[in-house]
Image (cartoon, coloured by chain):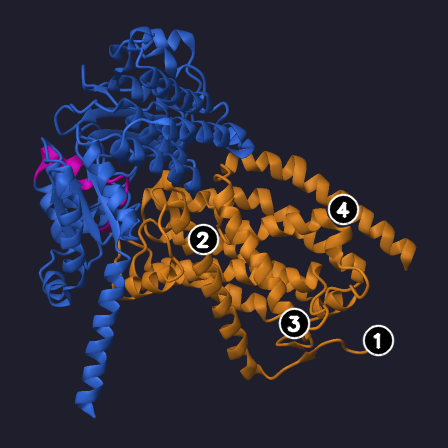
Chain colours: A blue, B orange
Amino acid sequence: MGLARRGAAVGLKEALARSAARRAHVLLVETPGHWRIRAAAERHVHERGWILARSPADADVLAVCGPVGTGMGPPIEQVWQQMPGPRVRIDIDDEDQVEAALARAAESIADTAGHLEDAATRPSGPDLLSVGSSDDEHADTDHSAHGGGHEGHGGGHEGHGGGHHDMGHDMEMAPHGVALAEGEQDRDGLEMDVLRVRLGPVLPHWPAGLVLRCSLHGDVITGADVELLGGQGSDADDPVARRCDAITSLLALAGWDDAADQARLMRDRLLSAGTDDRAVSDVRRLHRRVARSWLLRRSLRGVRPVHEHELEEHRLPRHLSGDTYDRLLTMVERAHRDLVTAERSASDDLPEDTRSDLVAVDAIPRLVQGLDLATARLVVASLGLDVLHAGRQVSHG
Amino acid sequence: MGEATVTAVAAVWAVAAAAILGCLIVVAAALDGVLSARAQGTAGGAGRPFGEAARLLRQRRRTTIAADNLLWRIGGAGLVVVALLMVTVVPLDRWTLFDLDVGVVWFNAMDVTVWALVWLTGWGSNSAHALVGGYRFLAHGIGYELPLMFALVAPAIAAGSLNVGGIAAAQGGLWFVVWMPVAFVVFCLGVVAFSVWGPFAAALGADLAGGARTELSGVDRLVFETGRYALLAAGAAFAVPMFLGGGSGPLLPGWMWVLVKAVAVLAVLVWLRRRVPVVRPDKFMEAGWLVLLPAVLLQDLVVAVVAVAGG
């Protein structure tokens, strides 16, 4: 009787493990210059019937796409520590390894005994926080939210930004090891709590390696510092597919999953089959759908218009003028134009050289200042940062 | 309308009501799974809700530093409770659990508590994105709640009763959806909104890394997601006696008509998510107050005039 019951319990556990492995949620981390690995991983995740996770709490698998460059290690480790478990980490250094890596992950997810051991040996929240505060110089990396504020074990109202307004680490000012929000004058002159929230580098639909340290009044960004981690990106090939990728991100952030999936399928076809007639008609279909959506237009119209003088001032490429809706349509139109010119193989009449695609990262703080957190995400995605220009790394907005 | 149109059944039948709600949840989740799979270019997907549930049952619960655990868990688990309380006043043809004279008000009171629950889910985890998500829901709430309330008023005026069974019975000849379409559409939008679904899912948006549910994992996330589907299903079920003539229909028995109509409304609401992007709360506020509210008030006026003239 007892044995039978135990047998049934084991059977149930195994059945759960097998079902769970069929529906894993994967949090992808892209390192700069390796978007193609991330794109391939997305495709295989969907083909398996798996899901892309939005936050560490939502993830079973952490898939690091590309070799981990300078400064990317600690944030990835923090995200790993925030995953609930059963958890699996895979590192993918090459497009060809994606399928095998995911298959390996599926096996590991079902390995219940291994996960029990992992759970027993994990550090506690206070342990993780104390590691952070012992190293003051990196206080902000260790304390603040990563992956865009999914702090999990890493703390709630995240630590103060890197060193300025340092309030010390004594427990009074930092209950549970997390610093309290500071006060600062709000735009209307009243005092307002200020929260430091870090966006990136582990954040879906966010440019690889980009870190934006924001000061928030409520949910409004009043200032931001920008930094690029993980070295320079290099794979600027397949510009059309890259553009479709940017369109996918913007549509996904706008909360239109179906249209985002359509753009992603188009990107995957471009990557696997190259450009053909079907690609041209695909992009036309997407353009029609996006241009027709009355709701999308209402949502994105008027969101952070970039004026003529700002283009000059921030050395931004011309195609970023207009509001977020304009920028989305421009992205689709440029993808279309590139496809058509590629088809005619008349590359001589390209009106813009690639240099004009460079976006100075230090323009980003100015562009997001005064926006709320979610709107800032839309605006950053609308820039289509395929080629980030490291230039001067840090500025204060 | 002299005699009682519905009979209240014994409380044990609440189990059956919960089971029916559970079936509607599974139907909605499976349909969403199929539609999602199709959009992603793969087949199948009907089994997704089961795989998802298995996965979340196996996943560990997690907490955050300095989380307000009690309020956080109340928020997450509350949605499914509210949905169950909603269906207590929805008559299954001749039977109801709770034959309340003010059933419409009860439903409305329940949907208002969702405000608190979603916000608490965002608040409790002590995380910036989750909290912003919670507030975004309140911003949507300010836009949708008043139009929803006035949409519920229209059938009540026409039937001269706040009793849900009475309203269903008053649609003998003509379903209310036919001559109060604006109220019906606004009601459906309200249902979508308090279920934090589709165009009204800004509080859980990708642009906030998951918003109010960012930090939820394991069984907590399972209960929260189930709660959203449950609210959607309860709202769809409530539309049946309010606008779609309750159990009236040819051939099939009344109780089956109620279920068929509820599933049909539910399917449309689930499908709606695929068609449209999220409505940003700041933009919706304008639409809610300047378009929906006047439109539904006008609808109420028309209904009132017809009711007075006809009565």
Mark in front: 3 vs 1: 3
State the CA–CA distance, disc 2 to disc 1: 41 Å
Q: Amino acid at mark 1?
A: Gly
x%, y% of residue A393? 18, 19
Q: Badge 4 local density, few (<14 within 10 Å), some, or many (20+)?
A: many
Q: Amino acid at mark 4?
A: Gln
Q: Quadrant of the C terminus of chain A?
A: top left
* Chain designation of label 4: B
Residues A204 and A104: in front is: A104
* Chain designation of label 2: B
State the CA–CA distance, disc 3 to disc 1: 18 Å
Q: Outermost residue toward the bottom?
A: A1
Range covered by the magenta-colored residues: A135-152
For disc 2, the marked residue is B118
Mark earlier in primary sequence (2, 1): 1
Mark earlier in primary sequence (1, 4): 1
Mark earlier in primary sequence (3, 4): 3
